[in-house]
Amino acid sequence: MTRLTGTALRVTIFIGENDTWRHKPLYSEIVHRAHSAGLAGASVFRGVEGFGASSLIHTTRLLSLSEDLPVAVVIVDTEERIRAFLPQLDELVAEGLVILDDCEVIRYVGRGHEA
């Protein structure tokens, strides 16, 4: 079982829900590449409202015509593994924001494993 505890690095990628990579949602491509790279895990979070470099506000409010909501992809692993993955994000993310944060993993247990 892979164990991840202690100091780690979190990469968060802020993109738009409608961003694509070769006709596939960009967030999905990032998650699949993270999985293929053997990273500990990746999650996609859909925002309800936000704006980025374009200064356009995107929202889920009923009267808004915007459907390109903000999306955050969060990946946590060792610093070495995250930094090795960054060139793939360079290739994929043409517009968006990629940030790195130091973090501490308290508990990481996969499903089907005893705690």
Image (tube, rainbow, N blue to C red):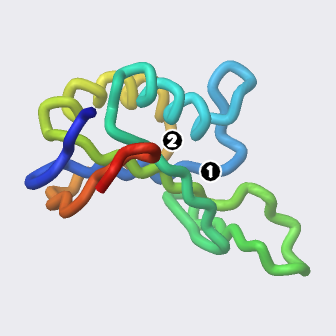
- Determine the residue positioned at 39% across, 30% down: 89
Residue 41: image location, x then y, percent: 40, 42
Q: Is residue 99 visible?
A: no
Front residue (pair 3, 40): 3
Identify the mark nearer the N-term, 2 or 1: 1
As shown in the figure, which amino acid type bears the numbered disc 2? Glu
Q: Is residue 45 left or right of residue 113?
A: right
Front residue (pair 50, 28): 28
- Determine the residue positioned at 67% across, 32% down: 20
Residue 66 lies in what quarter of the image?
bottom right
Q: Which label sits in the foreground, 2 or 1?
A: 1
Q: Is residue 8 left or right of residue 70?
A: left
As shown in the figure, which amino acid type bears the numbered disc 1? Gly
| Residues under numbered marks 2 and 1 in contact, where contact means CB atoms less than 8 Å apart | yes
For the C terminus, the quadrant is bottom left
- Determine the residue positioned at 41% across, 51% down: 74
Residue 33: image location, x then y, percent: 47, 24
Residue 85 lies in what quarter of the image?
top left
> Mark 2 falls on what kind of element?
loop
Residue 16 image label: 1
> Mark 1 falls on what kind of element?
strand
Q: Is residue 111 visible?
A: yes
Residue 45: image location, x then y, percent: 56, 59
Front residue (pair 26, 28): 28
- Determine the residue positioned at 24% across, 42% down: 77
Front residue (pair 9, 108): 108
Q: Which residue is mark 2?
A: 95
Residue 68 image label: none
Q: Is residue 100 depicted above or below 63 in this figure?
A: above
User: How far apart, in angstroms, are the residues tagged by discs 2 and 1?
Assistant: 9 Å
